[in-house]
Amino acid sequence: MTKPLKEPIYVSQPSLPNLNRVITGLGDLWESYILTNSGKKHRELERLISKKLKVDYCSLFCNGTLALQTAIHILGLEGEVITTPFTFAATPHVLTISGITPVFCDIEPETCNIDPFKIEELITEKTTGILPVHTYGNPCDVITIDEYRNKGLKILYDAAPCFGVERNEIGIGNFGDLSIFSFHATKVFNTFEGGCIVTNDKELKKKIDLFKNFGYSSPEKVVCPGINGKMNEFQAIIGIENLRIFDIEIEKRKLLFKHYEEQLSLIEGIRIIKTFKTVKYNYAYLPIVIDEKKFGVNRNKLYKKLKDNNVFTRKYFYPLCSNYICYKELPSADHKNLKNANWIADRVLCLPLYSNLSENVIDYICEIINSLRK
Ligand SMILES: *Cc1c(COP(=O)(O)O)cnc(C)c1O
């Protein structure tokens, strides 16, 4: 067995832009004294991101969670909203904080995304919308889900980890009524903290921009209630510079993903979450599912073994949101209705994946996994 690593390896490492370019950008701020309130950098990044994501409009936010909360408000969601329990805490929390009851729907075990055919039976007269997540940056069945719009439901996609993902060359932000993205440090594209809402609807874009700036339509006119959701000029500079290196970062991730794939496919009892030929991925995560019966040991033992060898993986998304103390009493949180989600949450593990990772470290990780096999 190879010797333990000297430095710990974490599940992700943020992409950092060229520091000199960032400093040059900061120089512009020092000259202009404009630090926020839809300044030059903010407007430039909105243009660049709309182009990159192949959508008409982008509204930048200080983080993905406030973008999500704003989108919920703008779409007028209330009552009950159907969502997945297999997600980050922010997804059900923003619903609850907006006075909406999250209704958990089971997932497809292959993709870990919401099962579009189980949505129908959860619809009641209180249902106003669906909040699916493109889990791990893997697009949901957007075609089937978008058909629920015909039933008068609003579709809001939590595309937080999905920056740059396309389906049949269509940017993933073009589906549903609105989509939100996160630019948190741990995401493939970051502004340290940040996020956006994208849409092709000019009226919605206007409403979003009013809401994120206290409802100000001009310096002496406030037309609606609103919050402070604005992205500042510093974040926008980081975004502009990180966007320059984005394609290169994804290309590196892709090669590393393939390297993992080659080795993991040889190990019985381990599978990578399903991917599709029609999708252009951003390789945000490397989620594997461990089948104890075939592999010989369970997920928690593998997690511990890797940790003992200085490799820090994450059990995204364990625990399931439906098992949080604040949600487990909901009728839809019943394990009987969420069999796949509970099954996956107990068996999934995200392995380290980021552009600076080396193939040697991947070999090392796969070697440890292989050594556990019984
Ligand atoms: C990261 C993430 C969020 C939250 O975004 P922040 O920018 O951290 O507020 C929401 N939903 C999902 C699925 C995420 O992965």
Image: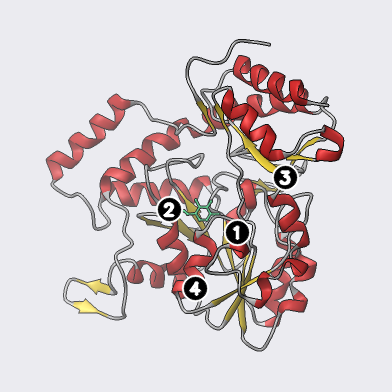
Residue 233 vs residue 89: left or right?
left
Of tags 2 and 4, the one toward the viewer is 4
Residue that label 1 marks: 174
Of tags 2 and 3, the one toward the viewer is 3
Q: Nearer the viewer, residue 139 or 286?
A: 286
Q: Are marks 3 and 4 in contact (CB under 8 Å)?
A: no
Q: Amino acid at mark 1?
A: Asn
Sequence-wise, the earlier of marks 4 and 1 is: 4
| Ligand 1 within 8 angstroms of badge 2 C-beta | yes
How far apart, in angstroms, are the residues tagged by discs 2 and 1? 16 Å
Q: Residue at x 60, y 69 (%)?
A: 328
Image quadrant assignment for residue 15: top left
Q: Nearer the viewer, residue 2 or 67?
A: 2
How far apart, in angstroms, are the residues tagged by discs 3 and 1? 32 Å
Graded by Cα atoms within 10 Å as few (under 14), some (14 to 19) or many (20 or more), the crowding at tag 3 reads some
The image position of residue 40, as x and y in percent, is: 27, 49
The image position of residue 86, as x and y in percent, is: 64, 57
Sequence-wise, the earlier of marks 3 and 1 is: 1
Residue 340 vs residue 17: left or right?
right
Residue that label 2 marks: 195
Identify the element where label 3 is drawn.
loop
Residue that label 4 marks: 96
Of tags 2 and 1, the one toward the viewer is 2
Residue that label 3 marks: 347
How far apart, in angstroms, are the residues tagged by discs 2 and 4? 20 Å
Identify the element where label 2 is drawn.
strand
Residue lying at the far bottom of the rendered structure: 125
